[in-house]
Amino acid sequence: MANPNLAGVEIRIDELKKSTPWFWAWVSTFVILLVIAGYAYVLQLRNGLAVTGLHDAFPWGLYIQNFMYFVGLSAGGLVTYASIQLFGAKKFEPIARIAVLQAFVCNLLAALFIIPDIGIPWRAYQFITSPNPQATLFWDATILNLYLVLCVIDLYVMITGKGGHSLEFKLTLISFPAAVGVHTVTAWILSFAKTRELWHSALMAPLFLSSAMASGIALLILIGMALRYFAKMKLPDDMFFTLGKVLGTVVFVDLFFLFVEIMTTFWPPSRTPGHATRLGLLLWGPYAKFFVPELTVFGALPFFLLLFPKTRRKVWTLATACVLIVIGIFLKRFALLAMGFGVSVLGPFDASYLPTVPEVAITAGIWALGILIFTMAVKLLPMESAPHGENATQASDNGHEDVPAAALQAEATTHV
């Protein structure tokens, strides 16, 4: 039985039928987490946000932290794809489709984390019926949804080949600024809050972008390595090593931005009490256990692993650096959010917050949904990138759009 074709995209049902018991155990694990999350969300809908650890002094918690985190993770994928289209980095072509898929899934999860944080999600229609253009959240939600649609269109064009390289390039001219915009506007939600001194910084947007690119590229490398091992995708070592070099540069920029913020805050002539008090919470206060490791173990250490070719060009050290970066940025997002509420706008106090079991269950369920979507997409869709250039263009111009997927995959393999 031939695989079905949906709008020009081959759905590889035969690959699903050939799946091993390990694959179904992997899928079942995340389905169970999703069911548990559904039960926890029903409890939250029934009892309200009282079942969470959120309160008046700490209105944003695990949901918003994950929203900011996944907005960042989506950056690395699209930046890698854009570098192929805009800067001719053909070395990254084998992972181009995976990069766009990562951007889509992470962006989708970021949007989903807003729903449980709303508390009463069916009132979301008011966003459309009574928009407030002066609110940063209005623009953040708008560009987030636009970015999500662009990721879908990008992936569709890449898989079907409709429009060729020319259309991909034009779409990149739109989606790349949208990717930068969604992270910038998300950072502005914090930096426009002038009552929270350390958030109220022009450096917040560049910090968000550097952290987003670091975590996103690190995640892309890890996903690529996993797919090469488990899905037998043909992804060359040299591509990973080049991505590692780019990642090392981004990590250095991120650490430099943090250094500049710390120096500006604590240098005696420029020291301001509000900024210093809040930054002190991160460096030696109650949130130092999250932030200081991010500067050292999860920041400086991976940078040095990526700095030297001897360590950067080894798969296991590159993977170690990427794992540390992904964890470190997650901790930094939590510390940054917690610090903002650690000091009241009316005076210093410790606004304690601890996620509850329902919060953790719902969060784990949204993560599980993302992993399931990514897993099934890789399994059912042709995710190994076809070659660009004259040969691909000529094939399209000569009317060979109906070439079997297996033949295109074989051609892609020879070019990789």
Image: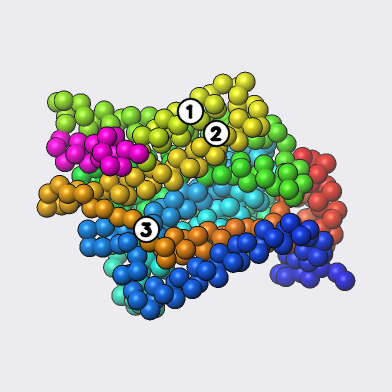
- Tell me the crowding category of disc 3: few under 14, some 14 to 19, or many 20 or more residues within 10 angstroms, Cα based: some
Name the mark nearer the viewer: 3 or 2: 3
Label located before the other in sequence (1 or 3): 1
Cβ–Cβ below 8 Å for labels 1 and 2?
yes
The disc placed on residue 201 is none
Question: Of residues 164 and 71, which is closer to you in this image?
Answer: 71
Kindly identify the residue that appears in the image at 73 percent across and 36 percent down.
236
Q: What stretch is highlighted in magenta?
A: 272-289
The disc placed on residue 301 is 1
The residue wearing badge 2 is 321
Q: What residue type is labelled 3?
A: Pro
- Horizontal relation, residue 338 to residue 6: left or right: left
Q: Position of residue 198 (x, y in %)?
A: 24, 42
Question: Magenta stretch: dominant SS?
Answer: helix
Q: In the image as oriented, which residue stretches furthest toward the front?
A: 357
Residue 126, above or below 233 = below
Q: How far apart are marks 3 and 2 (CA)?
A: 28 Å
Kindly identify the residue that appears in the image at 30 percent across and 55 percent down.
353
Cβ–Cβ below 8 Å for labels 3 and 2?
no
- Secondary structure under the numbered disc 2 in the rendered image: helix
State the image quarter where residue 374 is shown.
bottom right
- Horizontal relation, residue 55 to residue 94: left or right: left
Residue 180: in magenta span: no
Kindly identify the residue that appears in the image at 31 percent across and 75 percent down.
130
Quadrant for the N terminus, please: bottom right
The residue wearing badge 3 is 355
Label located before the other in sequence (3 or 2): 2
Q: How is the image coloured?
A: rainbow
